[in-house]
Image (cartoon, grey):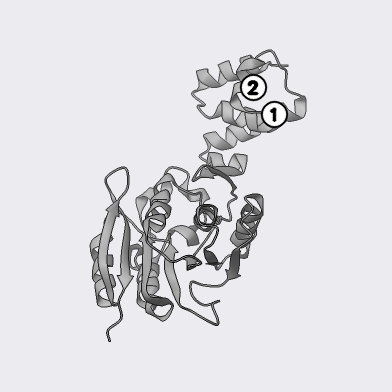
C-alpha cells in the first residue's frame, strides 16, 4: 500500500496539480496534514476513492464538483452539478451591492440564486436586509437552502420559479441583483475548462447570451421601488447593449464596472420612473 508521500510524488510526476486537494478531501483532512503525516497509509477504500476522483479530474470534471465545495466571499459553499460553480469575479456583484446607500431593513431580490452564494454573502454582511432569492431549479434551491442553514442566514426566503414569476404581494425592492445565464449557446468556450459539466441552463441564453439579461432589465420596473438599484453580471462584450437597455427602461446613473482582469463584468443603474 502507498503512503501519502508516495501518492503525492506520483501525482507530481503525472502533472496532477489538484491531487493534494483530492487526497485531503478523501482523508477528511486539510492539505497541511498531508505534509505533516507523509508516512500515513490510506485505507483501501480511501485509496480507491482517491484514484477514482483523480481520474475524473483528468477527464475534465471540475474540482469543486469532486470535493462538493467551493469558496465564495470567504465562505465554504456546498456545490453539485445542479448549480453553477461560484466564480471569483462574481464577488464584484457583492462588493457593488454593499457599496450602495440602502436603507436599514432594505428589501433585496436575487434572481437565479443557484448555490445561494450571492444572497448568503449579502445576508452575512447585512443581517438587517430582507432577502428573497428565486431559482427555477428545485435541485439548485435544495443546495442553496443547505448553504443558508450552514452559514446561519435564516432570513433569506427561497422561492422556486423563473425569474420574477414566483413573486407575489409587495414588489417594491430596493435592490435587484442577478448573475443570469449570459453565454451564447454556440460559444466555443463551453467545450473548455470544465464547463461541459456545469448546468447548461445556468450558463446559456439565446440571442448571443442576451435573452435573460434583457428579460430581467425590461421587467425590473414592475418590482423596483423608485430609487432602487438593478445590478447584473454579464459577459465582457455585453456592457454596451445593457447600458442601452437600462437607459430605455428608466434607469439613471447607469455604469459598467470591470472585474480584476479589466473586463466589463457588472452593469448597474438606479430606477427613476418618469413623473
Q: Which residue is mark 2?
A: 33
Q: Which residue is mark 1?
A: 27
Image x and y of residue 201, in percent? 49, 62
Image x and y of residue 148, in percent? 62, 55
Q: Element at badge 1?
A: helix
Q: Quadrant of the N terminus?
A: top right
Camera-side residue of 54 and 63 = 63
Judge whether 49 appears above or below 72 on screen. Answer: above
Residue at 48 percent of width and 44 percent of height: 194
The answer to whether residue 80 of the structure is visible from this angle is yes
* Left or right of 70 on screen, residue 25: right
Q: Quadrant of the C terminus?
A: bottom left
Camera-side residue of 22 and 191 = 22
Q: Element at badge 2?
A: helix
Q: Residues within 10 Å of mark 1 (few under 14, many from 20)?
A: some
Query: Of discs 2 and 1, which sits in the foreground?
Result: 2
Camera-side residue of 178 and 22 = 178
> Which of disc 1 and disc 2 is earlier in sequence?
1
* Left or right of 124 on screen, residue 208: left
Residue 168 occupies which quadrant of the picture?
Answer: bottom right
Residue at 38 percent of width and 51 percent of height: 92
Q: Residues within 10 Å of mark 2 (few under 14, many from 20)?
A: few
Amino acid at each position: 500500500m502507498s503512503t501519502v508521500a508516495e501518492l503525492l510524488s506520483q501525482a507530481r510526476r503525472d502533472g496532477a496539480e489538484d491531487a493534494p486537494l483530492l487526497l485531503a478531501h478523501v482523508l477528511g483532512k486539510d492539505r497541511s496534514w498531508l505534509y505533516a503525516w507523509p508516512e500515513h497509509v490510506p485505507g483501501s477504500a480511501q485509496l480507491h476513492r482517491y484514484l477514482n476522483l483523480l481520474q475524473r479530474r483528468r477527464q475534465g470534471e471540475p474540482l469543486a464538483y469532486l470535493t462538493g465545495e467551493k469558496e465564495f466571499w470567504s465562505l465554504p459553499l456546498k456545490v453539485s452539478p445542479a448549480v453553477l460553480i461560484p466564480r471569483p469575479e462574481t464577488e464584484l456583484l457583492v462588493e457593488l451591492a454593499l457599496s450602495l446607500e440602502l436603507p436599514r431593513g432594505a428589501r433585496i431580490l436575487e434572481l437565479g440564486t443557484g448555490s445561494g452564494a450571492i444572497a448568503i454573502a449579502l445576508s452575512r454582511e447585512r443581517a438587517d436586509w430582507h432577502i428573497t432569492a428565486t431559482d427555477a431549479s428545485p435541485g439548485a434551491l435544495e443546495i442553496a437552502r443547505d448553504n443558508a442553514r450552514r452559514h446561519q442566514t435564516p432570513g433569506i426566503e427561497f422561492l422556486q420559479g423563473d425569474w420574477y414569476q414566483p413573486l407575489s404581494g409587495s414588489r417594491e425592492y430596493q435592490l435587484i441583483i442577478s448573475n443570469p445565464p449570459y453565454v451564447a449557446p454556440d460559444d466555443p468556450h463551453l467545450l473548455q475548462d470544465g464547463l461541459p459539466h456545469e448546468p447548461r441552463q445556468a450558463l446559456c441564453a439565446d440571442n448571443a447570451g442576451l435573452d435573460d439579461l434583457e428579460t430581467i432589465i425590461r421587467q425590473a420596473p414592475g418590482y423596483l421601488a423608485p430609487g432602487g438599484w438593478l445590478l447584473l453580471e454579464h459577459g465582457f462584450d455585453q456592457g454596451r447593449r445593457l447600458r442601452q437597455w437600462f437607459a430605455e427602461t428608466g434607469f439613471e446613473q447607469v455604469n459598467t464596472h470591470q472585474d480584476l482582469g479589466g473586463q466589463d463584468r457588472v452593469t448597474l443603474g438606479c430606477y427613476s420612473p418618469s413623473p
